[in-house]
Image (spheres, rainbow, N blue to C red):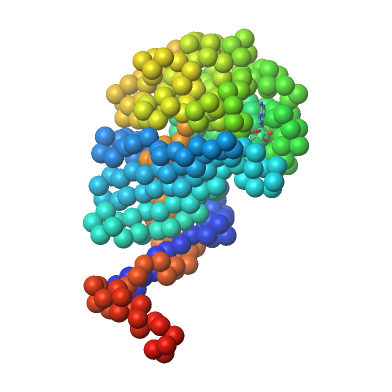
Amino acid sequence: MNKHLNLVPFVSVDHMMKLVHAIGVETFLVELAEFIEEDFRRWPYFDKTPRVASHSAEGVIELMPTSDGVLYGFKYVNGHPKNTRDGKQTVTAFGVLCDVATGYPLLLTEMTLLTALRTAATSAMAARVLAPAGARRMALIGNGAQAEFQALAFRAMLGIDQLNLYDIDAAASRKVQRNVAGLGFDITICATAQEAVLGAQIVTTATADKQNATILTDNMVGSGIHINGVGGDCPGKTELHADILRRSSIFVEYPPQTRIEGEIQQLPADHPVTELWEVLAGTSPGRESESQITLFDSVGFAIEDFSALRYVRGRLAEFPMFEQLDLLADPDEPRDLFGMLLRASPLTA
Ligand SMILES: NC(=O)c1ccc[n+]([C@@H]2O[C@H](COP(=O)([O-])OP(=O)(O)OC[C@H]3O[C@@H](n4cnc5c(N)ncnc54)[C@H](O)[C@@H]3O)[C@@H](O)[C@H]2O)c1
């Protein structure tokens, strides 16, 4: 019998950083992508629902649950594009993994870093089946919190070693350049999005703006490229001109959620899309020709967070980067919850 049923492993931001360094950022991304791919291949076994979103004028707060019948996971995440002006993150998150048989939490962890890692791992996993063969140069438009993670995942998993950076705030591009200096990238900081797209086989858009923005217009998108659209992930928050969508083969995570939140909210509800899990499971084709424009209309789905929670929990066995949190009430006799409270009274001490 576990004598410490009250305790739940908790991974703080500090411990997550130590865990990532102990494993190595690129190894972490590659291993995490393997877990995500494994879960995408068994997609039909999961409970799925569009995330539960609470919108406000400044942003959104979302809950993202899923279960495979053995484990249950959920993530709390927000998206507030104006936060960075006050020194706050646009996206913050934490999550929980639980045992379905008892309902007991098995892990509580920070997920701000983990979201950036899982988003990048998912993007690169999709690009592996969608990007043109031999791609070396990626345009990275929007150089905020997600940017370096995207760059590293694409290098580790696809061999991307040339980056064209563009951000409306040039300081953000210089930050990326500084952070990945010495990691072997050939970097060009560009003055416009159009310049960034030139010569790139992959275009990643990861901007944050609470509106229908047009980061890419139709004339900027040549045949044969792969677009990894990360920043359009909320109703009324998109990055691509609708004409690009009409020319692209569109791949999505979970259509009922992406039709609300993704770039395809701009298209009729019956516009054809392919579910990414089917490509990974081998039941739908990925890229089929050199001239095809492929778009991964990423919004972020609960199964990616579930895989990330599962991965982190597994790695803690080798790298014990966690503390125990006194999270669950554990009376000596399960029904004597009040008795436990009573015995803790300062008056009975
Ligand atoms: N799809 C997913 O799974 C997923 C996961 C995490 C974050 N996101 C989304 O990705 C986006 C980026 O997240 P972040 O944490 O890096 O945000 P961030 O605020 O740290 O960075 C966003 C960057 O975009 C830049 N930007 C804004 N408008 C621009 C424009 N018109 N052209 C070029 N650059 C522009 C900003 O200057 C900033 O540097 C957000 O919209 C977020 O909601 C999606």
Residue shown at 48% from the left, 18% from the top: 266
Q: Nearer the viewer, residue 79 or 95?
A: 79
* On screen, residue 320 above or below 285: below
Image coordinates for residue 70, horizontal then vertical, percent: 26, 50
Residue shown at 35% from the left, 70% from the top: 329
Image coordinates for residue 256, horizontal then vertical, percent: 36, 28
Quarter placement of the C terminus: bottom left
Which image quarter has ligand 1?
top right
* On screen, residue 163 above or below 333: above
Quarter placement of the N terminus: bottom left
Q: Report the residue that reaches farthest toward the front.
A: 347
Residue shown at 23% from the left, 56% from the top: 101
Q: Does residue 121 appear left or right of residue 96 in this picture?
A: right
Image coordinates for residue 10, horizontal then vertical, percent: 46, 62
* On screen, residue 73 above or below 9: above
Is residue 29 visible in this depiction of the protein? Answer: no
Residue shown at 50% from the left, 54% from the top: 110
Image coordinates for residue 225, horizontal then vertical, percent: 54, 17
Q: Does residue 113 appear left or right of residue 9 in this picture?
A: right
Is residue 123 visible in this depiction of the protein? Answer: yes
* On screen, residue 99 above or below 8: above
Q: Report the residue that reaches farthest toward the bottom.
A: 349
User: Dividing the picture into quarters, in which one does residue 348 lie?
Assistant: bottom left
Q: Nearer the viewer, residue 319 or 2?
A: 2
User: Dividing the picture into quarters, in which one does residue 36 lie?
Assistant: top left
Q: Nearer the viewer, residue 214 or 199?
A: 214
